[in-house]
Image: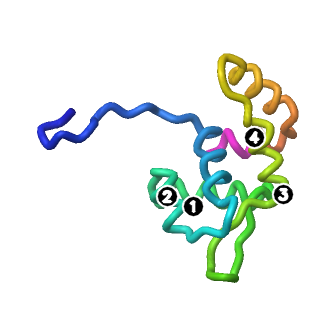
Amino acid sequence: MDRMGHNTEYIKRDKLEILLGILEIARSPVKKTHILYKANINFYQLTRYLDLLKGLDMLEEIDQPYKGYRTTEKGRQMLELFKFEGPDIAVSKKEARAKMSIEEMRQMQNL
């Protein structure tokens, strides 16, 4: 805790966790700024992650009911791959990564 009483301990998230968080946030139509705040990332990071997810057809831009983003069917399938909880989460991450294409993995590493 700092002198203002704020929690200063941060847990570093890996890229996969951030990507899955964005896909979860965008399950229903959401504005770009809402993704930014809910995912707790900066604008530069948000732009890169949105570009990646759009390039992988896991996220789409929408104009109705407002300009924003929504998770695609492919993105929902990705979320389903990681729906496992508990001690098997490491195994499920490995299994899901094995199902990803080489190109998708390269794009994730470039973030």
Q: Are marks 2 and 3 in contact (CB under 8 Å)?
A: no
Residue type at numbered disc 1 = Thr
Q: Position of residue 44 (x, y in %)?
A: 49, 58
User: On residue 73, which mark appears?
Assistant: 3
Q: What amino acid type is highlighted by mark number 2?
A: Tyr
Sequence order check: which comes first, mark 1 or mark 3? 1
Quadrant hosting residue 83: top right
Q: Secondary structure at mark 1?
A: helix
Vertical position of residue 88 compared to residue 74: above or below = above
> Pointer 4: what residue?
106
At which x and y percent is residue 91?
75, 20
The N terminus, quarter of image: top left
Q: Are marks 2 and 1 in contact (CB under 8 Å)?
A: yes
Magenta residues?
106-111
- Between the residue at mark 4 and the residue at mark 3, the CA separation in whole angstroms equals 22 Å
Residue under the image location 80 percent in, 37 percent down: 81
Q: Secondary structure at mark 3?
A: helix
Residue named by callout 2: 44
Amino acid marked by disc 4? Arg
Q: Residues within 10 Å of mark 4 (few under 14, many from 20)?
A: few
Closest to the camera, between mark 2 and mark 3, is: 3
Q: First in sequence: mark 2 or mark 3?
A: 2
Residue at image location 74% in from the left, 44% down from the top: 79
110 sits to left or right of 9: right
The image quadrant of residue 73 is bottom right
Q: CA distance from mark 2 to mark 1?
A: 5 Å
Question: Is 12 part of what is drawn in magenta?
Answer: no
Kindly state the secondary structure of the residue where label 2 is placed. Answer: helix
Q: Nearer the viewer, residue 38 or 85?
A: 85
Assign the magenta stretch its main secondary structure: helix
Q: CA distance from mark 1 to mark 4?
A: 18 Å
Location of mark 1 (residue): 47
